Amino acid sequence: EEPTEEPTEEPTDEPTDEPTGEPGASDSKRFTDLGNHKWAEEAIYRLVAAGVVNGTSDTTYSPGANITRADFTTLIVRAFKFEADIATFADVDSSKYYAAPIGIAKTLGIVNGVTETNFVPTSQITRQDMMVIIYRALGVAGIKVEKAQSPTFSDANAVASYAKEAVEALTGAGIIAGSNGKINPKANTTRAE
């Protein structure tokens, strides 16, 4: 016999107005490996719900794993919903999921290659390169970063000349933070960061 009781409320895929840091109705993913990265949990779930990032499996995000140049660029292009013609790099396979976002970012001037023709998509991205990409993306999006006095970092002299403006602007605005008095410009960026 078929049940006669009807559900009292239709399930919805609409996101809630106020993300809680926990997966909501629109977010079927629940990551079990965020314990040591609670500081990033709310942002991770917001980005998952928005379709900007994915987990490394249905139940894991791998927050401590380093992120590649391709994945970080893809994340930025998705987050800002950038669209443009798709430029190419010799070492970016056009059949890869990251080819279009990298091409869009190149067209918009958000990324340059490590050489004139190569992007090295599967290399891990450094913190200074991450900051350069964020800074340029904010500029393309028309978001002005209010320049304030950048904190003093003991390793500031290790920041490459091409990254100095981005590092100073983003740390001065409080968008990016250092750790233990250092900015760690040449360290790799993790998925949680």
Image (spheres, rainbow, N blue to C red):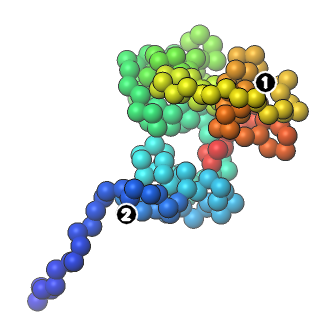
- The correct choice, above or below, for 19 with respect to 157 in the image is below
Residue 60's label in the rendered image is none
The C terminus sits in image quarter: top right
Give the alpha-carbon distance from disc 2 to disc 1, as whole Å.
Answer: 42 Å
Taking the spot 41% from the left edge, 28% from the top edge, the residue there is 82
Can the viewer see residue 158 in this picture? yes
The N terminus lies in quadrant: bottom left
Residue at the spot x=60%, y=35% of the render?
A: 68
Residue 151 in the image, given as x and y percentages of width and height: 79, 34
Q: Is residue 188 above or below residue 20?
A: above
Q: Is residue 184 left or right of residue 133?
A: right
On the image, which quarter does residue 150 sit in?
top right
Q: As drawn, is 21 to the left or to the right of 39?
A: left
Give SS at disc 1.
Answer: loop
Q: How many marks on residues?
A: 2
Residue bearing mark 2:
25
User: 127 or 149, which lies in front?
Assistant: 149
x, y percent for residue 128: 70, 28
Residue at the outermost top position: 116
Q: Is residue 104 above or below residue 151?
A: above
- Label 2: how many Cα within 10 Å (few below 14, some 14–19, many 20+): some
Q: Amino acid at mark 1?
A: Val
The 10 Å Cα crowd at callout 1, few under 14, some 14 to 19, many 20 or more, is: some
**Which residue of the protein is positioned furthest toward the bottom in this rendering?**
1
User: What's the residue at 38%, 25% (across, down)?
Assistant: 83
Left-right relation of 63 to 78: right
Residue carrying label 1: 159
- Residue type for callout 2: Ala
Q: Are marks 2 and 1 in contact (CB under 8 Å)?
A: no
Image height of 73 relative to 60, above or below = above
